[in-house]
Amino acid sequence: GFSAYLTTPLDVIKTRLQVQGSTTRYDGWLDAIKKTWGAEGVNGLFKGSVPRIIWYIPASAFTFMAVEFLREHFNEKTDTDAETALN
């Protein structure tokens, strides 16, 4: 959750650059940061941080759970296969 919050400004700038379409509002990422900071202040760089944290915490928990489940499952299979090969 903390890393999601800290990287929110990068996500805001990336999204603004992606959605500007054919009408260029920003001339690169540095210009996007300057214009966002100038128009909205630091709050503009952290827009959407709460929904982002709410999304990332369960997503990260599910990812870790899946990795641990698969690691345990495949380690058991590898151990069983190794025992069979030795016998």
Image: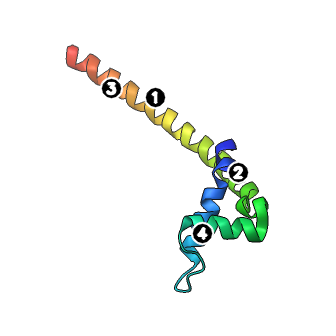
**Residue type at the position of mark 1:** Glu
Which residue matches tag 1?
A: 72
**Residue type at the position of mark 4:** Asp
* Residue 86 spot, x, y in % from top left: 21, 14
Sequence order check: which comes first, mark 4 or mark 2? 4
Q: Residues within 10 Å of mark 2 (few under 14, many from 20)?
A: some
At a point 69% along the width and 49% down the height, the residue shown is 5
From the image, which quarter does the N terminus lie in?
top right
**Residue type at the position of mark 2:** Ile
Q: Nearer the viewer, mark 4 or mark 2?
A: 4
On residue 53, the disc is 2
Separation (CA) of disc 3 from disc 2? 37 Å
Sequence order check: which comes first, mark 3 or mark 2? 2
Q: Is residue 56 above or below residue 76?
A: below
Name the residue at the top extreme.
Answer: 87
Separation (CA) of disc 4 from disc 1? 48 Å
On residue 78, the disc is 3
Q: Is residue 73 above or below residue 63?
A: above
Residue 25 placement: quadrant: bottom right
Q: Nearer the viewer, mark 3 or mark 4?
A: 4
Which residue matches tag 4?
A: 31
Give the side of residue 56 with respect to residue 17, left or right.
Answer: right
